[in-house]
Amino acid sequence: MKLPVSARLAVVSLALLGSIACGAKAPTEPTPPAPVYELKTEVFSGSVATGGSKAFPFTVVNPGNIQVGITELGPTSTLVMGISLGYWEVATSTCVEQQQTTQATINVFFMATPASPGEYCVGVFDAGNVVVTSDFKLTVTHY
């Protein structure tokens, strides 16, 4: 059975309108703003004896720069110490060192950029210069 011309025109018009309607974009939801992470400053303190070391864990919520430096050191504030940065092994409560310097001096900060959030750690150690037990404060900034 052959449709009359007016009926064929109606079918073609409906198909054309349907294809135009399908190509129209649906309203989109606004993109939520990116989260804002707080810059955290943590201070760790302790003592290092000749040949000794200390490590401290901290949690990184958002990857970004980590800065670490010795901000207090005594009784000799001019000592050159070692600083290490790594990830914290929770099961054994140990710091698995990833980076280190044996040239850390007071108020000189070192920087690293972790690849992902997680448990990290910072350590301070005798780089061969500690003659008497030395007290220190390490300052770490991170997100």
Image (cartoon, rainbow, N blue to C red):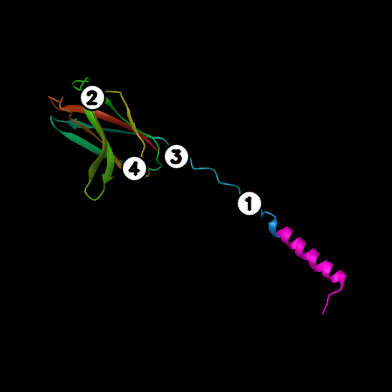
Say which mark, if any, is on residue 92: none
Residue type highlighted by circle 2? Leu
Residue for badge 4: 59
Q: Position of residue 14 (x, y in %)?
A: 78, 65
Residue type highlighted by circle 3? Tyr
Which numbered mark, 3 or 1, is in the foreground of this view?
1
* Inter-mark Cα distance, 1 to 4: 36 Å
Residue type highlighted by circle 4? Thr
With respect to residue 119, does 139 lie above or below? above
Say which mark, if any, is on residue 37: 3
First reached walking from the N terminus: tag 1 or tag 2: 1
The residue located at (55%, 46%) in the rendering is 32
First reached walking from the N terminus: tag 3 or tag 4: 3
With respect to residue 130, does 30 lie above or below? below
Q: Are marks 3 and 2 in contact (CB under 8 Å)?
A: no
Q: Please state the total of marks drawn on the protein image.
A: 4
Residue for badge 2: 73
With respect to residue 82, does 35 lie above or below? below
The answer to which image quadrant residue 118 occupies is top left
First reached walking from the N terminus: tag 3 or tag 2: 3
The residue located at (87%, 69%) in the rendering is 6
Secondary structure, mark 4, is strand
Range covered by the magenta-colored residues: 1-21
The quadrant the N terminus occupies is bottom right
* Inter-mark Cα distance, 2 to 4: 25 Å
The quadrant the C terminus occupies is top left
Secondary structure, mark 3, is loop
Say which mark, if any, is on residue 28: 1
- Few, some or many C-alpha atoms within 10 Å of disc 4 (few <14, some 14-19, many ≥20)? some
